[in-house]
Image: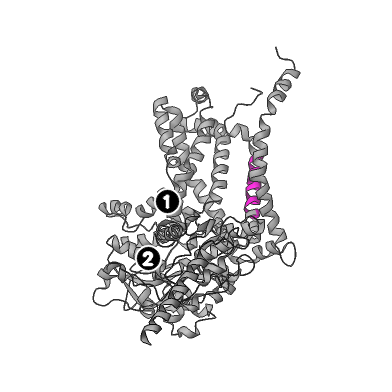
Amino acid sequence: MKRSKFISASAALLAAGLVLAACSSGDSGNEATDSASETTTTEEGSGDLSGEMTFVSFGGAYQDAQTQAMVDSFVEANPGVSILQDGPTDYAKISQMVSAGNVTWDVVDTDPFFPIGKCGTEAEKLDFTIIDTTGVIEDLISECSVPSMTYAYVLIYNSEKYGDNPPQNWTDFFDTANFPGTRAIQNSAQGGGYEIALLADGVEPASLYPLDYDRAFTKLDSISDDLIFWESGAQSQEMMENGEADMIIAWNGRAYNAAVNGAPILPAWDQNIVVYDVFMVPMGAPNKELAMQFISNAISPEPQGRLQNVIPYAAINVNAPASTGDELFQTYLPTTHIEEGVIQDQTWWAENQDEATSKWTAWTAG
Amino acid sequence: MQTPSQPQRSLSKISFLVVPVVVLLLIVFAYPLFLLMSRSFSDADPAWYSTYEGLFTDSVTITVLLRTLMMGFIVTTVSLILGYPYAYLMTRVSPTWRGVLVAIVLLPFWTSLMARTFAWYVLLQDNGPINEFFGIFGLGPFSMIRTTTGVTIGMTQVLLPFMVLPLYATLSSIDPRLMTAAMSLGAAPRRAFRKVFLPLSMPGVIAGTTLVFILALGFFITPKILGSPKESMIAQLIDQQVSRLTDFGAAGGMSVLLLAVTGLLLFLMSRFVKPSEALGVRGAEE
């Protein structure tokens, strides 16, 4: 009995294996749904996709890291595929391409507000029969976008200046009496300024949105004598390295770069503002299906795991292997700090971008 | 001996050479500009003038536009004060030294704008090299970064050649014997300068100041990095409209405003001096 059961079980497994092998061979580019149905989370594509597509991201170290983690392996697993890269991501360009009917970009790494706000008009609705979102953090998925990685706006302080009594949260950031010094925030409406002001003023994370602009500005005005602004990532890194700012709200990636360069800084992760990039497909992209295949691969555990080994941005797939970065790297990696963070509501931001931006500009530049 | 018809014939022979350049400019420059400007009307909602109504009633746009004009004025004045003596010096030295002086003032062109601006960013810091230098004499520290002063320094370095070169072109065409003649007739050097040299140099002054002012209006990176948000100029607002909000209508409207101001200035300049004269170009009549 046991032996026959063993034989029938083996025969069944063998048959299944043969069926799988038969299905995945002799595939044409149009049979995308076929190959997707048997793609497991450990396979990187069925191996016989073909065609050309253009991948666009923000350039620099980030795009290099994405090339290492997601692009190269996809091309290796699918020798018939060639991926052109372009950049940097430019929303005006995407808008113009779509309205001219001449789209040359297939997958674009963007901020979430763009595809969420332009879903169905300038961003294609994603085909979730092709894109496998198993393990991807649900809050970060929208009709027209899936997350590509998360990063954070985190409180970075000068460890030499504050020594034994460092600022640990946003309340401390706004407390100039107990924590004197220059503070720096990004000159951008979506740069976390609103959120941290409200959080410091006692607003519960769950009640942050819709943002109370006046309350935020009142709180920000309370430290206006000690407040300076950074415009670019490079400038924020410079501020951390030359001590221009004693406390700064910066991208964790830039803080890591500064720390590597020897800046005397440390992060305080409590209530960090969790932000993320997304993959989107511009409306009318020439290689839509291949684009969706690429995205499906890029958000799967292995490539996500690889990404958070080479650059301190967090994987968005909970099944991704833990990062192998060294101690300094891990200090600035947001993966384990998403729990204590506050996720910036990208849907609200997509809808209220204009108003929030014009109010911010009026407050800073007017 | 030239008959009246000859100059015209030779002109028409070569005038067709201008056509390719004009076509290129029309396609690459005039047409996109026209598209952008028409967006400010076609995107307008509900009325065709809504974009402009919005811009003129928005206190931020007006503040930033006035600030841009003021920065242009400041930078132009500083450039003139620095540029005039420099251009004058260039007319007085030997050709070798003149070459050196030209190279010095043109040096900014040969380096990357980003590198230059970040260099100033580091230099102008409160605890940076410039303040350290002043500190040796017990002066300062002067607040330069994130102030109008810092932005002026950065912009002047870039725009100085545009003041010096037109000025030099005009100053070098002034016959030095005129000054000698004035002094031989009894004028003190200072009076001779005021009554003879200065008026003759006006075309160059007007050309230089107009050029620098117009260019200064469009500055973007320098005020962004060297200034605080309170030093924001109009180009930064336009960039925000295009890059972030993809509101081409508003961007077009602001661009039209900027273009209108520029056009007005050029028109005013043409009232005082022929552009060809100002740039030191010898007219056919000579």
- Quadrant position of the N terminus of chain B in the picture: top right
Rendered image quadrant of residue A142: bottom right
Rendered image quadrant of residue B254: bottom right
Check disc 2: other Cα within 10 Å, few if <14, some if 14-19, many if 20+. many
Indicate whether B60 appears above or below A179.
above
Indicate whether B260 appears above or below A242.
above
In magenta stretch: residue B268: yes
Q: Residue at x 33, y 65 (%)?
A: A256
Q: From where the camera sits, is residue A190 visible?
A: no
Indicate whether A234 appears above or below B92.
below
Dot 1 amino acid type: Thr
Q: Residue at x 65, y 56 (%)?
A: B252
Q: Indicate which disc residue B117 carries.
A: 1
Return the chain for callout 2.
A
Q: Which residues are magenta?
A: B256-270
Q: Residue B77's spot in the image, x, y percent?
A: 50, 46
Rendered image quadrant of residue A329: bottom left
Q: Indicate which disc residue A306 carries.
A: 2
Return the chain for callout 1.
B
